[in-house]
Amino acid sequence: MSEYKLKSSKIEKAVVNAYKKIESKFVDAFINEDGTLKTGGIAEKATGAYQKIEDTAIGTYKKVEDAAVGAYKKVEDAFVEAFLEEVSKDEDADTDSAGSDQKKTAE
């Protein structure tokens, strides 16, 4: 079966926008213009807190995405089970040659 990606949604946009706001505030508070970290004990605490927030936001999004993809795969699997049957390569080759014989007979 094919792998799928979740389409853009309101949930995704909300998570991304919330993350961008947090990132912007963090950069303003703790990063120098040259990209270095502002020194001080609070900076290390903030970095850890920021990392936890980032991990939580990404983890939450992945859970939502996994749930949606998982639900789709259940529907897809149910459809395959209900309406399709697996054909081995041998059966497929036999079907192709039988179809050719039928065409020759019809002519």
Image (cartoon, grey):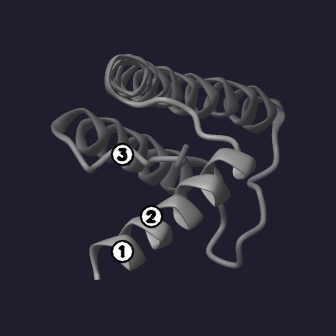
Look at the numbered disc 2 and give the secondary structure of its residue. helix
Q: Residue 75 location, x and y as percent?
A: 33, 20
- The reply to whether dot 1 and dot 2 touch (C-beta < 8 Å) is yes
Residues at marks 1 and 3, CA–CA distance in whole angstroms: 58 Å
- Neighbourhood count class around disc 2 (C-alpha, 10 Å): few under 14, some 14–19, many 20 upward: few
Instruction: Identify the residue under disc 2.
Output: 99
Residue drawn at 48 percent across, 72 percent down: 100
Residue indicated by mark 3: 16
Report helix, strand or loop for mark 3: helix
Real-space Cα distance between discs 2 and 3?
54 Å
Q: Report whether 105 appears left or right of 85.
A: left
Q: How many marks?
A: 3
- Identify residue for label 1: 103
How would you rate the neighbour count of disc 3 (Cα within 10 Å): few for under 14, some for 14-19, many for 20 or more? Answer: some
> How far separated are the C-alphas under marks 1 and 2?
6 Å
Q: Nearer the viewer, mark 1 or mark 3?
A: 1
Q: Residue at left 43%, top 53%? A: 24
